[in-house]
Amino acid sequence: MTLALFTADTSASVKVAAHLACADNLDFMRGLPTGGMKLIVTSPPYNIGKTYERRSSLDAYLRQQEVVINACVGLLHERGSICWQVGNHIARNGEVVPLDILLYPIFKQAGLILRNRIVWHFEHGLHCEKRFSGRYETILWFTRGESYDFYLDAVRVPSKYPGKKHFKGPKAGQLSGNPLGKNPGDMWVIPNVKANHVEKTEHPCQFPVELVERLVLALTAPGDAVFDPYMGVGSTAIAAVKHGRVAYGCDIVPRYVEIARDRIAQYEAGILRTRPMDRAVYDPRLPYGGH
Ligand SMILES: C[S@@+](CC[C@H](N)C(=O)[O-])C[C@H]1O[C@@H](n2cnc3c(N)ncnc32)[C@H](O)[C@@H]1O
């Protein structure tokens, strides 16, 4: 197994720690300490015949997911979280099979506790002819136990009415909302990575770095370990190192690992472009609406 540790400590760059490997995730996980990961966040293959996956029966796919999920649970810190980001498997006859519904019992069986089923809404994707076009996927956020890290203030978003005050009662004249902003809720509107997105690489289905940043900031503290067992081109690793966390990740496709390492190196050099978390979803003044 290849383990590459990228560190830099020059005045021109940022000090980061990213352990990225070209490896099968079960092999890679055998080399990681149990209970060490504060956050495991990933988007596994959906078994829909993408270039990096061999389409198998749904049962075989779920059995394989169960093995990987159970291995991940063994790595999880007692106050840690797992976020599994999935969409739909589309059967050969066109039937839509929502993967989160099928995967939920595996996490439940492993003793994890569901905290949110986050709906990630985006505007771009396939235009369907025989059903409504799919414009959301989900993130199942589970914790290992009853006590878990959650830093809401780190991910608050601007309130709709920032200066609004109570106008009667014992709190009259006081701000009615939190001055730090509001809870972002469980429906996240974030552009997906299509052709014009600044983060687009040759990977066919990256998730946006800003999506993972919100999870990293809400569920970990600086110095914590964040792992992605299906890391692709390293979007999770970038979100982690951007915020001073230690990134771990693996992928079986050498080219994706190469791109992930290159993106980390670009981040260290201060030249990696990612879409900022606070940018409006569509800004007509910016090229391509700010995507
Ligand atoms: C949906 S993509 C993840 C993309 C990633 N979130 C990103 O932003 O780049 C799933 C990835 O899992 C990888 N993969 C599939 N089977 C794997 C395995 N057994 N071990 C490690 N990676 C695997 C694929 O090569 C693919 O890049």
Image (tube, grey):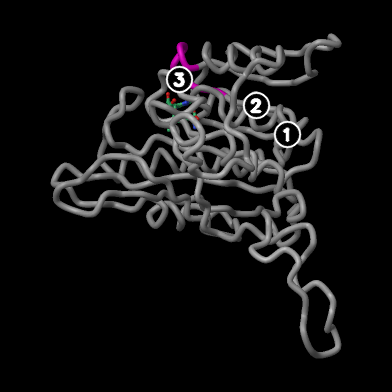
CB atoms of marks 2 and 3 within 8 Å: no
All told, the count of numbered labels is: 3
- Say if 169 sits above or below 134 in the image: below
Q: Position of residue 101 (x, y in %)?
A: 39, 57
Q: Which residue is mark 3?
A: 201
Residue 178 left/right relative to 96 = right
Residue 225 left/right relative to 67 = right
Considering depth in this image, is 179 or 70 the residue closer to the camera? Answer: 179
Q: CA distance from mark 3 to mark 1?
A: 25 Å
Labelled disc at residue 248: 2
* Residue 169 magenta-highlighted: no
Q: Quadrant of ligand 1?
A: top left
Q: Position of residue 272 (x, y in %)?
A: 62, 19
Residue for point 81% across, 90% down: 169
Q: CA distance from mark 2 to mark 1?
A: 7 Å
Residue for point 47% across, 50% down: 120
CB atoms of marks 3 and 1 within 8 Å: no
Answer whether residue 131 is visible to the viewer in this image: yes
Q: Which residue is mark 1?
A: 225
Q: Is mark 3 within 8 Å of ligand 1?
A: yes
Considering depth in this image, is 27 or 160 the residue closer to the camera? Answer: 160
